Each structure stands twice: as C-alpha cells, then as structure tokens.
Amino acid sequence: MNNTAEIAILILSGFNEYREMFQHIAREAKGCFEKSQWKRLQEISSRRIDLYGVKVNQVVAAIAVAEGARWQWPDVKREYAELVTIRADTELAETFFNSVYSRIEGDHPSAQAQLFIPRIRPEQSGGNNIYKSHSLSTGAYGMLRNVLNECGFTICWENQRRDICYLMRYMRQQWLDGGSEERQIDAHSSVDVIRSVFYRNKAAYLVGRVNGRSRQFPFVIALLLNDKGQLYVDTAVSDPDQVSVIFSFTRAYFLVDADAPVQFICFLHELIPLKSRAELYNSIGFYKQGKAEFYRDFMDHLKLSSDLFVPAEGIKGMVMTVFTLPSYPVVFKIIKDRFSSSKYVSRATVKDRYALVKHHDRAGRLADTQEFTNLQLPAERFHPDLIAELLQVAAGSVEMLADRLLIKHVWVERRMTPLNIYLQEALKNDNEEQLLHGVNEYGKCIKELAAANIFAGDMLFKNFGVTRHGRIVFYDYDEIMYLTDCNFRHIPEPMYPEQELADEPWYSVGPGDVFPEEFNLLTTCDRKIRTVFNRLHSDLLTPEWWRGVQRQVEKGEIVDVYPYRRQQRFSR
C-alpha cells in the first residue's frame, strides 16, 4: 500500500468511526423512549453534536504524525473518491474529507480547488428501501394497524383500537369529507412510511406520505407514553405547513437511524419543498452536511441574483452587527469589536452561549445557527454603507481582499420579522388579533424557554423574531443563561423616597440576581401592549412564578412542548 492510499484510508476510517457512533446513538434513542429516559435522550442528543468535530480532529492529528510521508492531496482525493463512490452516504463522506482537508490546508481560494463538491446523485436518491408501502385497498383499519405494529416497539399500547379509530376519523375529516381537493384519497391510494422512527424529547414520530388521487402529501403520526409507560397516538398531521413546523429550525435535531441520509432528504423535500435540503439535513442531525448544502446553495444564489447585502431590519444590536441579502432568507451575525457599556460579556462568552444553544433543547423557541470561519463574499455585492459600517464596528472580524470581503467569523441564522416591528405594525393598523397573538406568543416563548431551563436575559421585543408560521422565537444569545443559575428576587422597598429617585439602585445586585418586577418596563412603551401582557402573562412579573419553574427543572421534570397545537391532540 502506498502512502497516498494510507492517507485516504486513514480519513475514511475516521469517517466510518463517526458514522458508527452516530448510528449507535440514533439506535439507542428507541430504548430511551421506551423506558421514559428523557434526560438520557437529551444527553445523547447533545453528545452527538460534538462527534463530528472530535473525529475530524483525531484524523487531522493522525495525518500530522504522517507528515514525513510523501503524498499529494490530488492523489489522496482520487483514492478517497474511489473508496466512497458506491456508499449510501457518499455526500457525507466527501464533506468529511473536505473538513479534514480544510482544517490542515486552510480556507484560502487556492486550497479550495481540492475540495469535493458533493451533489445528490440519482442512484443515491432513488430506491424504496427506507420506507414501506401500505395499501388502502383492504381497508383503512387494517392498514393503520399494520403501520402502528411495524414500528418495532416492545412496549404495550394504552388502547390501540381507540387510537386507530381516531386516525380513521382524522383521515375521513382531512382526506375525504372536509379535506382539500389536493389531499383526497380513495381505495386505490396508499401510504408510504419511513421504516425508521424519528425521536425527539418525549415523543416518537412516524413519518410518511400519502399517495392520493392527484398528488402526494405528508403524513406524520406523533406517539407518546402515558404514566404507566404505555404507548398511545397523540395526534396526526398532514398539512405541509404543519409538518414543516415539526422539522423546524427552532427545534432539537431528530434522532433517527438513517443509513442512507440522502434518501431521507429527497423523500422529505418532495413533501415539504419550502424546507431546503440544508434545513432537512440539519433536522436529522447532519448539521455539517446541512452547512455544506447551505453554502453551495447560497453561492449558487449569488450567481443568479443581483441585489446587495444591506443591514438587517430592526434596531441595531449592542453586541452583534447583522446584515442580510434581501432575496435570501437568512441573516449574517458578526460580533462587534467593542460592546455597549451596558453589556458585561466578552467575545468568548458570546461564543460559549451560542454553543450552549446548539447543544440545548431549543424547545421550538430558539433559532438554530450555522457557524462559519473565513467566509469570503464578493465585495461588489455589498452596499457601500454596509462595508463602511462593518469596517468600523467589526474590523477585527472583517477584511477587504481586493474584490472579496473576508469575514473571519460569522453566524448564519434564518431571517425573521423582529417582534418590535411586528407589534408596531399591529398598533399602526389597529390589528387587535395580530397584537394579541404577538404578545401572547411572546409570553409563551419566555415560559417555554424557562421550562427548558433557559433564561433569555435581555427580553426586549427586538431580540425576538416572528417566523412565517407566526411563531415567536428568541434569537439574541449574548445574555442567555441556565434558569437554575438565576436568583429571582423582589425589589426591596426603599427606605426613603430619595432612594427610589436615584440613578443607581438602592439595593445590592449579585451576578445572578434577577428582578422580574423590572420586566414590566418592557411593555410600558404602549398602553395596549401593557394591558394585553398583564392580562395574559402577569405571572412573569413575580419571582414566585420563576422559582416554581426552577423547582420543576431541579427535580428533573421535562415539560411537554410539542410542535403542534393543543387542539390538534386526540382526546383521551
């Protein structure tokens, strides 16, 4: 064996170890679910996120030991390509090679010539080995019973007959009597269900599609456990927008046994096309592949578009400078060189808090991010005012390179409408429904984060965004912390009136002290907002509410937060 082949095999061995460990964790999820080991499920989900970086680092270290050997990267790439070309996860293997190569050679344009450009190949995306088809020709009851029984669970059902009847009623309401023409079925229809179960938090999901009269549409069944550890169907979802929410960028990654990831992605993308392939890779845990897919898609978009990068909509941040390309639905967030005097955080602290969010359960209320280093973008696509701003406030992270703008460190995040703008529009248009929805969702967002052991910190409206589904999400992480690290206090009464009028507080404030009564300042900007907030969420202004949630978290309780509305759940 020559040195070139040895290096190629070394990289592939590292990738194989990564995939084996990744799949082992995905398969462990079934046992955790059946035993109601919710903490364990969260732990292995978090641990899986670090696997990729750990294995890349190990391979890079091993190659460094072999530096004396004689080999060239083009030869290694050619050998490696022959080794991985027939795999079911070729695109992942090629991205792993790129990660190793870039870690050693850097990100400069001349080095990038040796990178793979993974693309989905027809032979990878085809085939039906990831799903099983179920015909409706012999009756809906038998079909649904087969779908539920073939999940492979070893635990008992609470009342499977009842659940099947609920699913049949759902089918009749959604696909026969009251369903849209696009989601109509008959006796010749069938249902294709992915063989692997999708696990996340306290739920398991059966994911499939219905082959209806005129078109295909998604079909998801959510399964939960009761207090006795028995299985039951909580709901079914078939509206593409609602299925998209289940795969949202605001939720933790699924644990699912995916030997052929690209087939999963193609299957899902056909059903929820508004979800990019990058987002779908992220949703099933392959976030490095999602990052690679996003980068290629974005670079292709730049070639086909002509608009300019501009500052993002909303109030400028005190820690981040944020810009966007109007024709593409993301924002780019760069840490400023200097922060506002009111911010007591460092650059390292900000990075740590973004890493915290990456590993934590996002509970449908925290936006996922992709982190890039040494990202180069064409300078001609930037508005001159934006370039001037970036060089002024983030010169340590931004550098001009002839016709390119080098961004040394940046996070990419889905673009949303800032909540302060959403509420201003509601007030301007006298839209009571929008105002009620915005304020209610704002309070629910804070409460659901608290239940997930997250205290948002800076809870100004400008730090929250509204998704296209109307869901409110927190996206400013520089002051985020664990709820259990907070000390919620009442504001002490002043001893005399002059204390209350002083610029500085008349009471001591420790590092973790939080005074919920001060949150009322967030809603004093408008009487209508304050009235709605106090009616719906005044409990957020009391230390007692926060301490109660702390006790729940400290007991290890994991609150049920599911990606569908309460009224969609089947009655039990």
Image: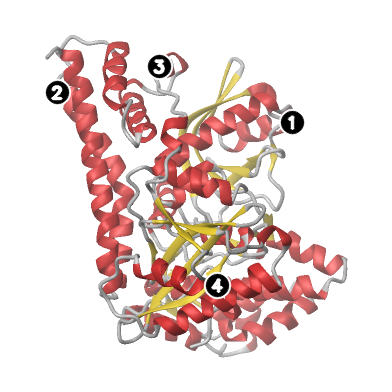
Q: CA distance from mark 4 to mark 2?
A: 50 Å
Is residue 515 found left or right of 36 in the rendered image? right
Category of crowding for the residue at label 2, using alpha-carbon neighbours closer than 10 angstroms: few (below 14), some (14–19), many (at least 20): few
> Marks 2 and 3: CB-CB under 8 Å?
no
- Find residue 65 and name its label: 2
Secondary structure state at the residue bearing disc 1: loop
**Viewer-side label of 4, 1:** 1
Residue that badge 1 annotates: 307
Secondary structure state at the residue bearing disc 2: helix
Q: What amino acid is found at the position of numbered circle 3 in the picture?
A: Ala
**x, y percent for residue 369:** 49, 48
**x, y percent for residue 356:** 39, 56
Category of crowding for the residue at label 4, using alpha-carbon neighbours closer than 10 angstroms: few (below 14), some (14–19), many (at least 20): many
- Find residue 111 and name its label: 3
Residue that badge 4 annotates: 446
> Marks 3 and 4: CB-CB under 8 Å?
no
Q: CA distance from mark 3 to mark 1?
A: 29 Å
Q: Residue at x 64, y 87 (%)?
A: 497
Q: CA distance from mark 4 to mark 1?
A: 36 Å
**x, y percent for residue 122:** 47, 31
Q: What amino acid is found at the position of numbered circle 1 in the picture?
A: Asp
The number of callouts visible is: 4
Q: Earlier in the sequence, mark 4 or mark 1?
A: 1
